[in-house]
Amino acid sequence: MKALLKRNIKLYFRDKANVFFSMLSVLLIVALFALFLGQGNWGSDEIRDSWLMAGILAVAALTTALGATSVIVEDKVNKITKGFYASPIKRSRITAAYILCPFIVSVIMTTITAVAFGVYIVAIGGDMPGIAGLLQLAGLMLLSSITATAIVCFFVSFIKTNSVFGSVSAIVGTLSGFLMGIYMPIGNLPSAIQTVIMLFPPAHAASLFRQILMERPMELALEAAPELDLPELQEVLGVVFRFGDFEITPVMSIAFLAASAILFFGLSVMNMRKAGKS
Amino acid sequence: MDYDSGKVTISGYDLRKQAQSIRQSIGVVFQDSVLDNLLTVRENLYVRAGLYSQSKSEIKRMVDEAVRVIEVSEFLNRPYGKLSGGQRRRADIATALLHKPKILFLDEPTTGLDPQTRLSVWETVKKLQTESGMTVFLTTHYMEEATDSDFIIVIDHGKIAAKGTPQELKTQYSSDSLQLVPNNAEAAEQIQRQLTEMKMDYGIAGGTITVKLPDTMASTAILENCKQHIASFQVLQGSMDDAFIGITGKGIR
């Protein structure tokens, strides 16, 4: 299985265009922010930048995991799997290698993104989160990659042609920015759409990232301007999600991410097994 | 794929009960490639060897051996997708041989290759077969390729239409023929009269008379009788192509 997993990961990174397109949403978000989304009242620049970083980490986990699943589709389209089936390796190992690949790619790519953005934030005079914050961040990156992988594997297990995969990638790349409340802060959206966002598991990863990354900038902003309405700002920016008066706690978000990961993993394994048999 | 009835045994293993042992003892070269275009031949070989063994030294040994036998070293570090058709085929065969299978399945390995590359693929396969003594199981549309094998099964519409050694099939399903070129038009008529008298089956095309022979020796009697009318002649032995047509029927369905 190690050989297959290495192959799958290599194939993702070898296809430079695929790597670029799986990061395209991230690049677009950064560009849009630099051009116009970054304007307006954010409380402080640190708040804005860490808010942006949180969203980008959540998006990157999803889009890179999706990019790495292109191997699954390519193998199916080019009938490369029959070569594996003729060898003694167990089917379950093949499936495991397919599922682990997007996870590892997602972790690698979000780590690179986090480091790059971290360097930028420190360079413009921002603060690094402390050790506890970094650990929380690392743990959350793992969890968000796991959930993202489970979701994309489930959808990709239905895809049988390259063109469908291309369309799905384009849709996910575009929609994820909205569904995680990045193109527009969640507070500016109608409440029906807010509900949809809260049902989208990766949006919870985004909200948790915001809680970790924006904690310190929020404190600083409050010190500088004590009249700031922090709970209001947190809600508008999607740092915390609220259903009416009900506030979703971090533990609930984590549980939601984990539960959807388990659900989608189960479903995709079931679906891939079925497909492997025919 | 499962089967409906009967029993399938491959090198002594039952297909349903010992599928794993079967996979260990077969190598397959598919009709269309199953290697990764973006990886080099070496990387491809390492990936596939990794399906058979966990040990690094073992994998390296398998790859080195296959590279040596199939002589793929000249394009070992080039991406598979950039190779020519013949090089790809050689890489495919090297992949199938990594674990030293007892049976090598080749599914139309030379389809779409130029004659020279086809020849080199065949040389490789024959060398392998004689050196290692493995069984080569080949499917092909080219009858001249089948002629070199030890045993042939002709499959028509999914059913076995005939089986035997190439010699047996040729004797049974194809006939030898004699081609005569007459001296002139009058001689041609003479020959035809003679042939009708001898009750031979014949046809004329482009001034050449082709006579169907029960066996090659029958030609001597005809030649003896028509000696003075013939400009030149040729005795043709039945080929596998003829046998194939004889087995599957003449018309194109």
Image: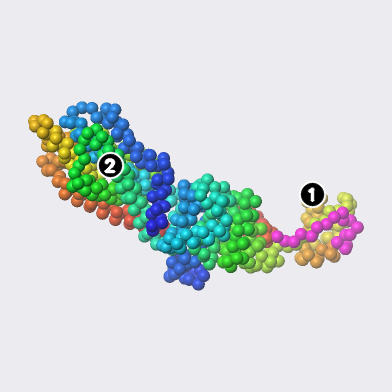
User: Is there CB contact under 8 Å for labels 1 and 2?
Assistant: no
For the residue labelled by badge 1, is the local secondary structure a helix, a strand or a loop?
loop
The residue most toward the right is B228
Rendered position, B246 above or below B112: below
Quadrant location of the N terminus of chain A? bottom left
Residue B137 colored in magenta in the image: no
Residue B221 location, quadrant: bottom right
Q: Chain of mark 1?
A: B
- Number of labels in the image equals 2
Q: Nearer the viewer, residue A244 or B74?
A: B74
**Place of residue A15 in the rendered image (x, y in percent of width and height, measured from the top left):** 42, 44
The reply to whether label 1 and label 2 mark residues of one chain is no
Q: Is residue A250 left or right of residue B164?
A: left
**x and y, in percent, of residue A231 in the image:** 12, 37
- Furthest toward the bottom, the residue is B12
Residue found 14% across the figure and 33% down from its top: A221
Task: Say whether residue B231 is magenta.
Answer: yes
Boundaries of the magenta span: B223-239
Q: Amino acid at mark 1?
A: Gly
Residue A112 drawn at (x, y percent): 31, 43
- The residue pinned by badge 1 equals B206
Q: Nearer the viewer, residue B88 or A224?
A: A224
Residue indicated by mark 2? A114
Question: Is residue A132 at least partly visible in the picture?
Answer: yes
- Measured as percent of width and height from the top left, residue B110 is found at 59, 54
Q: For the point 42% across and 48% down, which residue is it?
A: A11
The residue depicted at 24 percent of the width and 36 percent of the height is: A122
Identify which residue, A228 or B31, lies in the foreground.
A228
Badge 1: residue crowd in 10 Å (few <14, some 14–19, many ≥20): few
Q: Chain of mark 2?
A: A
**Which three-letter amino acid code belongs to the residue tagged 2?**
Ala
